[in-house]
Amino acid sequence: MIHPQRLIEHQPASAGTEQTKDRFVLYWMQQSQRMTDNHALAYGAHLANRAGLPLLVVFALTDSYPEANERHYRFMAEGLTELAGNLAGWGASFLVLHGAAQDVLVPLLPRSASLVLDSGVLRHQRQWREAVIRQAQTVMDGEITEVDTDLVVPVRVASGKEEYGARTLRPKIHRALDRFTQGAPLPSLSRREPDLGRRLAGALGLPVRDSGSAVALLKGLDLDRSVAPVRRFRGGETQARARLERFLEERLAGYADKNVPGSSLSSELSPYLHFGQLSPVTVIRALRSRRADAPPGEGEQSFLEELVVRRELAFNFVFYNTGYDRFGTMTHPWAYQTMKDHRDDPREFLYDLDQLEQAKTHDPYWNAAMEEMRLTGFMHSYMRMYWGKKIIEWSPDPETAWGRTLHLNNKYFLDGRDPNSFCGVAWCFGKHDRAWQERPVFGKLRYMNARGLERKFDMARYIRQVAGLRQEETD
């Protein structure tokens, strides 16, 4: 049963749907690239069974996804390839179409009895959905339903406004949490027509991509190929489940100590959550199943804070703050004032973007963090904070620092270009934080330095860990 508050209904037009022998329920998949606990897919199946129609799932593959490069595309394509086989085995038809959704879906909308979409909160994702919904409303009289399936508590339900910080959102999340931890089991399809998409593609001249392999799927696309795929992470639901199981078995108990660089306690699930290859609901259900009726331990409590409260705070920020990706509107007034007061403070070290990107600074810990990012598309969470703070210190002004941090974050991280990315970068500039003791350059922004790392952690261990990753990725 899909919780009704996950559903956002859009009013259809009064025009009748074109009556053809190939009528179907259409699910435009974009953000939620999975079968397990995909409430949008489950709702599409429900509508298809209710109407006695087949289900057609379409993914629109564009060459120009904002800031994406070959690293991101390869990871996504690995997941889509696995998904194609799984959907066919279930009995749904799946097409990967080359082009923008608002273009490639046009021939299919008049033949669709109903349209289902998964939610996205970034500006361009919302604009794409608005364009498709407007087109659908002119040619369809069936249901047009958007489904919020990539959060535990849907963003509109958790809060109706931008929250100041975790402390204001946390109680709202916890009050609603149990209502939204139900999974989304997929029913058997009453009409199994996996070849429907192939027939429609031939009849309508649709720009179909070969989803037989990741290489075939991406062949010939006009991609930014300046950033290579990584070995450390492979995309897909199978890989996501394997990472989750390893985390639960080997790392969860010690997760409260995750901030120790070199500790290898990170869940490493963020790339899979970013591409919708793993649902946070799946993760919560796995956690609860493991401990049965026992209360959550310290490690689980720490992990749930990150998975639910902090992640959903980032979605709240992006959804309600229309200027989330602009320097002048992404943080608090007190932070802008303190940055203004200290923008002309002398900097001991200044680096240009290329020096930062090539990890050529005086700081071995920062260089190791940058190298971990470039090599693997991932970085230890505590080092992410340190990494961002030092860019502020080594840039000529706050605006330049913000632009560099967001650019490098989105270019190299597999989970970049994400609400968590925009929120994490904004956090470096005071968002969801408080004012601290005033100091040069930073003003009242939180400050971090190498001596603090050395005092708290065995940083030589982290350096060795990154050296090992370098060997793994280059062998």
Image (cartoon, rainbow, N blue to C red):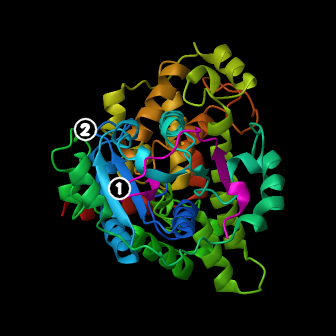
Residue identified by numbered label 1:
76
Q: Amino acid at mark 2?
A: Asp
Does residue 8 show up magenta in the picture? yes
Pick the quarter of the image with the N terminus: bottom right
Residue identified by numbered label 2:
224
SS at badge 1: helix
Cα separation, mark 2 vs mark 1, equals 15 Å
Q: Residue at x 50, y 40 (%)?
A: 136
Residue 206 visible (yes or no)? no
Q: For the magenta stretch, what is the residue range?
A: 1-29
Q: Amino acid at mark 1?
A: Met
- In the displayed structure, would residue 62 be above or below residue 86? above
SS at badge 2: loop
Q: Residue at x 36, y 44 (%)?
A: 412
Judge left or right: residue 21 versus residue 183.
Answer: left
Residue 286 rendering spot, x and y as whole percentages: 60, 78
Judge left or right: residue 421 versus residue 7.
Answer: left
The picture quadrant where one finds residue 231 is bottom left
How crowded pointer 1 is (Cα within 10 Å; few <14, some 14-19, many 20+) is rated as many
Residue 65 rendering spot, x and y as whole percentages: 36, 38
